[in-house]
Amino acid sequence: MNVYSVSMIVYFIIAFAIAIIYSRKRTTSNEDFFLGGRQFGIVFVFFTMMATFLGAGTTVGTTAWIWKRGLSQVWMTAGYAVVFLFIGLFLAARVRRFGTYCNAYTFADFLEMRYNKSARYIGATLMWFAFMSIAAFQYMGIGRIINTVTGIDYNIAVLIAALITILYTSYGGMWAIAITGVVKGALVFIGILIMAPVLYMKAGGMEGIASAVPVQHFSLVGYISPGQALTWFLVFFLGIIPMQDWWQRVLAAKGEREARMGLMYLVAGFVFIETLIYMIGFAGKVLEPNIANPESLFPTLVIHHFSPYIGGLLLAALVAIITSTASACLLVASTHFTRDLYNGIIKPNATDAELLKFSKISTLGLGVLVLVFVFAAPGMFELFVISADILGASLTVPILAGFFVPRVGEKAGFYAMLAGMIGWAVSYMGWHPMGFGPAAVGGLFSLIAVIIGMMVLPPADRAVLEKMGLMKPDETVNVIKG
């Protein structure tokens, strides 16, 4: 057994120990399991978010995509950064306030209160699908690392990844993710901070990279059209806004300030880490020009260009952060399954103890079901984009309208969701006006529907807006009647 394998095994043992300890100490209610008792400060909000978004996508995935497409990848990174800046400035405090007023757990709670039950169930189903897909993406990332390091068959490595994620998440819930997220986030920060300059210098610095890498790699549209570039930006700008993972962290925050500042720090940390990831990707193009599978680039660079002891720590940190992302995604899927199916339809009067028990059981079951997504997926990148696509197309406009446009009533918001789904489906089947993809087309359909709905359908009920914390009792808004 090599040093890399030992490092990962030691990490898994520590992670399980933390999950078991915090399951017993701090997870005594359903709110503890899903929202950490709503006690997260700025540091926990920041690191749990960073641990989620520094998963397989921004490590294994992004380095592979940069190896293939160079700076064309920046449009996705920009979508992430801009949307989190927007969320931190304008949405985080509103979402946390809504959580306080309505004891909310999910964005689907918002859809039901602002629009109707049908909106809730449609939105929750889409989110469930998206996060099962993203969890599958993480399984694939961990599996690829285990396969590269140990030589174990990739399919078996994915099964190992699934087992680790399922047991860890079902035992510890949000507190286990939060506590280990702080440690994992710090480890990955340090690891990438070490890797980037070392690999950059080994590749010959800017001069060596420029002479060895194709010219197209340095163009923002070297491998894609301008329409595709804008589509990639919109996929992640639109797709992130409805995503339950950041809603869950914000709803878990102690208050509005913690929610807002945690997201603002995330933007700075994300841009810094992504810059280093780009350095690693470009260096990898020089150091490993003939790699058979670019998705193996990150662990291959570690194994080939660092000592076993440093490399073992780097890979352990990488697996740790991807496991954290997988756990967070699995917890999101379980949250919707428990809140929207079991508590919403099957057993509306379930006690807190019954909900907690079902939450843990559903986490186990859904973790196994994710494997279907893994082996049915066309690839890591495709699975990632599809999940963001459908969320952005159908849910972003109704959510933003629900927070910022009081005139949008129940029916207008609901029809906007349906219009977005139709637009997404039409574009997914091949209609790409001016090169735009499903997220942009669906978002446009949804926007048109909400504008028409504002003009011809009844406005929102003022009492509902006040109950949700979206309007003060003495506030005058001339577009709302009643």
Image (cartoon, rainbow, N blue to C red):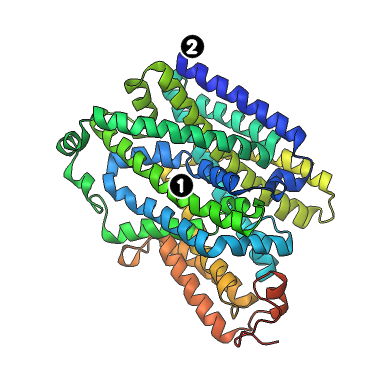
How far apart, in angstroms, are the residues tagged by discs 1 and 2? Answer: 33 Å
Residue at horizontal 46 percent and vertical 23 percent from the top: 313
Specify whether residue 378 is in view: no
Q: Nearer the viewer, residue 152 or 204?
A: 204
Residue 57: which quarter of the image?
Answer: top left
Residue wearing tag 1: 384
Residue 188 position within the rendered picture, expressed as x and y whole percent measured from the top left: 46, 34
Q: Earlier in the sequence, mark 1 or mark 2?
A: 2
Single out the mark in the foreground, 1 or 2.
Answer: 2
Residue wearing tag 2: 1
> Looking at the picture, which amino acid does disc 2 mark?
Met
Q: How many marks?
A: 2
Q: Is residue 426 above or below residue 63?
A: below
Q: Is residue 42 above or below residue 473?
A: above
Under circle 1, the secondary element is helix
Residue 353 position within the rendered picture, expressed as x and y whole percent measured from the top left: 83, 44
Residue 322 position within the rendered picture, expressed as x and y whole percent measured from the top left: 51, 35
